[in-house]
Image (tube, rainbow, N blue to C red):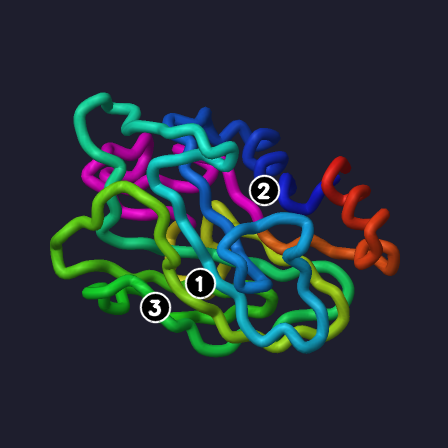
Amino acid sequence: MNARLLLLGIVAALGLGTAAQAQYIYVDANGDGVCNFSDVLFAGVTSVDVWLDTSHGANGAAVTCADGVNPLDIGSYDILIRSSGPGGVSYGAWTNNMSGYAQLNPPTVAGPDFGVGYASSGTYNPPGLYKLGTLALTVTGNPALFFLASPPPGIPSPVTGFGSECSGSDNPNTISLGLDFFDNCAPTITDAVETTTWGKIKMAYR
């Protein structure tokens, strides 16, 4: 199974609910602002960017708040990330990219897991695409990253998601991965042929 679909499979198997919206959160490993087959972790990668689109799904289709009233704006965010596979990731500093946001849940590392949260002073950014921040890291081998829907032990951030005037399904005014939306993407484990033209074609269709 494509590692980018791992979380979707987990939450579906656990019956955590159906998507009310279709937001899209993703990791960009090569600085081009998107997540696709070119985003892989290998020795020498020193940072990744985390992006969130509050008003579009992964397919680019526009979405609106499920309550039919409020906007899909953003006033805070939390992310939970886990590394897995051959090799490993040593997490470094998190650099917030959201102007006017202050630390809410401190950057925390617990084994293969990382979490962090920031919030604005009370104002909301309009619906749209945002680079939340940049995570410094040191990569060994060829691991993968994926988002977690709920916190592992030792991580204070409660969800991967964002605060909004839009109503959440379980967490008030929090749009949560695994509950309110499922679209997510992060670097997958590659293999020796995936840096070739044929390898890239294979990754695009698997």
Query: Along the horizontal axis of the image, is 5 left or right of 131?
Result: right
* In contact (CB < 8 Å): disc 2 and disc 3: no
Which of the two labelled residues, at mark 1 and mark 2, occupies the earlier sequence position?
A: 2
The outermost residue toward the top is 68
Q: Quadrant of residue 78?
A: bottom left
Residue 61 percent across, percent down from the top left: 43, 29
Label at residue 7: 2
The reply to whether the C-beta atoms of the residues labelled 1 and 2 are less than 8 Å apart is: no
* Residue drawn at the location 37% of the way across and 53% of the way down: 158
| 1 and 3 marks in contact (CB < 8 Å) | no
Residue at the farthest front position: 197
User: Where 52 falls versus 89 (above or below)?
Assistant: above
Which residue is label 3 attached to?
96
- Residue 150, image x and y in percent? 46, 48
Q: Magenta span covers which residues?
A: 160-185
Camera-nearest label, 2 or 3: 3
Alpha-carbon span between mark 1 and mark 2: 16 Å
Residue 185 is situated, as x and y percent measured from the top left of the image, at 56, 47
| Predominant SS along the magenta part | loop
Between residues 40 and 107, which one lies in front from this camera angle? Answer: 40
Viewport quadrant of the N terminus: top right
Report whether 21 appears left or right of 151.
left
Whether the magenta-drawn stretch holds residue 137 is answered as no
Label 2 sits on a secondary structure element that is helix
- Looking at marks 2 and 3 on the same chain, the residue that comes earlier in the sequence is marked by 2
Relative height, residue 30 to residue 60 (above, below) = below
* Residue lying at 68% horizontally and 46% vertically, measured from the top left: 3
- Circle 1: residue type: Gly
Q: Residue furthest left?
A: 122
Does residue 29 sit above or below 173 in this rendering? below
For the point 63% across and 71% down, the residue is 89
- Label 1, on which residue? 115
